[in-house]
Structures are given as structure tokens and as C-alpha cells.
Amino acid sequence: MAVENIWFFCLLSLGYCGLSVQVPSASPQLSLLSTSPTDISVMWLPLSSQLSRGAITNYRIDYRALEQVDHIYSVEVGGNETQVTLRDLKPNQTYQLRIAAGTRAGFSQSSEWASHHTPNLTQVLFAPTELKVRAKMHSLHVTWQPPPNHTQITGFKLSWRELDGEELANEEKPMVNERIQQIKLRKRVKHHEVTGLAPDRLYELKVWAFNKQTEGYPAVWKGRTEKLTRVRTTDSLPPLPPISVRARANSSTSIWLRWEKPHFSNVRIVNYTIRCSPAGIRNASLVSYYSSSSQEILLESLKPFTSYGIAVQSNGADMRGPFSTTVEESTLPDRPSSPPLDMQLSALDSYSVLVSWRPPLEPNGVILTYWILYTGNISHPDHLWINLTHDGSVTSAEVQGLMSGMRYYFKMGACTEVGVGPYSPVKDVFTPPKKYELDIHAVTGIIVGVCVGLLCILLCMCVSFRNGKTRYAPLQIL
């Protein structure tokens, strides 16, 4: 009887052990993208403990070309992996993919087939390579390398968003926080620090190249920020920077700036500090700081048509936090605040003058036209001066149709889309008097006339001489 009881309890224990690890009840949802025309990046989120029903030991990814559905290929990866890249595929081809999760008890039922079309080899910007992300509690340090066809790109774009995918209660896709933040980066930039994040949160980050015609395929990273480490006092942690910092030009000298509180903060934020300086300039004397107790501010007394880099800092009662990611915004254009420089006048002849100049020191926008005003009477008001307009790309012009031997007065102004700026100081120039010019035709006519007259006189004299000789011939005496 005792032996039977022992066998019974052994079988019961084995039964419970067998029930503790089962086949997963669902498969992960796939996310597919191509970083080049010959590969597909396959990504998924781990299953929740309710769906996995045990430790996931491996994943199996099946794929096939749509033109050859009978030829199915499979790739298996470890249970701690959340992505795999399928390489050496055909460009401009449709593929179907599915995934199954496995425990020690076996694989789950495969997911539905998902389709993906690899890009055309000649019509795509490749994704950046060697994407690496170092996650901290409140930030992500991102590095990458340019794509193979980097000569075709204008710059990079980087976006990030928080994914609400901690516990999946069913087979549906995880809820996504739609607050996507995106920035543009110059072509030479190969790293960036994303700040203002919350600890132990799941984030999706993308980096892709772009040019004037199209945007390339992204390199994607998904992962968690570090968990919040326990410290003796919460006051030792500075407040996190604001998030969703947005800048919009309000006028030629002001920018509206708005932001939101960080999702997580261990201290009470009492106010904010705003740092503003012309973009790309590291001169400390040009950096301005503003303070605001609300989540917006109007930055004033800025220069027209100038790009500014702006960041916001959260302040606690007795400590300051780090600054947010810098955003860039340009003020609107305005009239030029200075005239064209170094206007020079030189008379070309009695009827024309050459005017030359240099662009204004403070154009406050794109110079569309230059205005050249001139008059022979300096006491005339501006509307009575003759106004000539020339394209904003030229720096010299010839003024014709003037009168000889006169003194003319000139001044200039530059014009943007907003209007014309101040005029340069008045300068004068003399057109030389008209010189005596020999009229060849008239002289030729006079010479011909004189010659004809002399010839007629000679002929008359000859005729008169012969007639007179005949008339006064001596009489012959017979």
C-alpha cells in the first residue's frame, strides 16, 4: 500500500510539472521593414506571461516568396531575441512571413501570414547602418553610420515614441502612445542624445535618411530605459527636462515656445529656464536665458530671419535639471535694417553711369530686388526720383538715357518680400559734356561740292578763253 502511494504521488507530481510548462497560447505580432532592397528586418514584442505559459526558449520565423508559396524557409532564434534580419533576398519582391513562439513543451500555432514588399534597388535610400542605442534611466544615446548611398542624402530624421506594451492581455497589437517626437539632423551628424524620457518604459526609436525627393527606410530600435535606482533621498535626483518642446515663429523678432511637463518627476517643478542662442554659434555672449512659471513663453528681441537653437530646463525648489533636446526655429523675414554697402558711381560716357555696390550687412531675409533712385535735382522728394529695379542677385547696373554735362544724384535700397529697407547716403556724379564730333558725311558732301564747283569754274574759264581767242583773232591783210 505504501509503494502504491509513493507511485501515486510521483505520477501526480509529474502531472503538475507537465502542466506548469505548456505550449504558448498565442504568437507575437510581427513588425516588418526593409533597411535595404535585399533584406527584411523582422521584429516582435515578447509575449506576456499569461500568453507564453512558461519560459520562451526559441522563436521560429517562416518566410516564402509570393511567387513560390510552396517553398517555405525557416529561421530559429533564441527566446531572448526580439528581432532577426533576413538577408540575400530579391529586390522588388513580395514576401510572406509568420512567427511561432516555443517553450520546452513545443511551438505555438503560427501567426497569420504577413506580406512585405522589398524595395526597388534604384528607387530607395538605404537605412543607416550600425544603429546602436545606449539606454539610461531618462535618455537614449543613439549612434549610427550613414547608408551606403550617403552621397544622395540631405540629412537624417530621428523619431521616438513610447510603447504601452508591458502586459499583453490578448493577441492584439500593443497600445501605442501616439505622441511621436521627431527632429531633423544635418548630414554629418552621426549621434544624438534623446532626453526627457521616463525610467523603465518601452520606447521605439527610428533613424532614416532623406533628400529633397524622398525619405529612406528607417533603422529601428525597440527597448526599455533603465529602471529607477533607489537612493537615500529623493531630493538627490534633479527634475527631468520638459518634453514635446515646440517652437513657432511669431514675428521677425519673436518665437512662441511651448512644452509639456515630464511624465515622471521625483520633485515638484517650480519654474523653467529657457536657453536661446543663434543656431550653430557657441559664443557664450550670444546665449540668452529666460524664465517662465508656465509651460509657454514668447521669446522677444530676436534678430529677423535667424535660426535659433532653444532648450528648456526644469527647476525644483533648490536644484536645476538637465536641458531638453534642442529644437531649432527661424524668425520671420523683415525689411533690411541696413542699406547696400559701398555704392560706387562712374560715368561711362555722356549718357550713362555704372553703379556698383555690395549687399547690405543686415538683409533680414532674401534680397529680391535692389532699388536705384536718381535725379538731377536733389531737392525733389523721393517719389519724383527715377526708380530702377534690378534683380537681387546682381551687384552692378548700367543706368542709361542720361543727359550730357549734368550732375546726377544717386541712392540705393534693398528689398525683401516684406519691403524695402533704408536708402544709402546720396552720392553724385557728372556726365561729361558732349564733345565735338566730325560728321564724315557732311565733310564729304562739302568736299564733293567744292570740287564740283571748282571744276565748273575751270570749265567756264576754259570755254571763255577759247571763245575770246576766236573773237579777237588778228585780221589778215590780203
Image: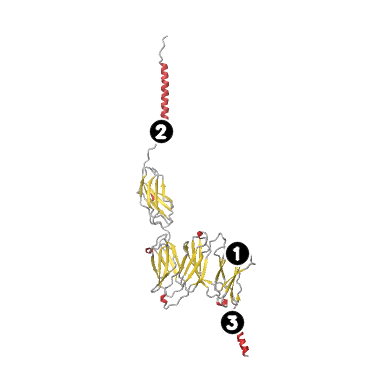
Within-10-Å neighbours for mark 1: few <14, some 14–19, many 20+: some
Q: Residue at x 41, y 29 (%)?
A: 450
Q: Secondary structure at mark 1?
A: strand
Identified by mark 2, the residue type is Val
Mark identifier at residue 94:
1
Position of residue 47 measured from the top left corner of the image (x, y, whole percent): 56, 74
Mark 1 or mark 2, which is nearer to you? 1
Residue at the far top in the pictured view: 478
Position of residue 262 measured from the top left corner of the image (x, y, whole percent): 45, 72
Q: CA distance from mark 1 to mark 2?
A: 91 Å
Mark 1 or mark 3, which is nearer to you? 3
The residue to which callout 2 is attached is 443
Position of residue 366 measured from the top left corner of the image (x, y, whole percent): 43, 56
Question: Quadrant location of residue 253?
Answer: bottom left
The residue to which callout 3 is attached is 17
Q: CA distance from mark 1 to mark 3?
A: 44 Å
Question: Quadrant location of residue 51?
Answer: bottom right
Q: Secondary structure at mark 2?
A: helix
Q: Earlier in the sequence, mark 2 or mark 3?
A: 3
Q: Nearer the viewer, residue 32 or 393?
A: 32
Q: CA distance from mark 2 to mark 3?
A: 130 Å
Q: Secondary structure at mark 3?
A: helix
Q: Earlier in the sequence, mark 1 or mark 3?
A: 3
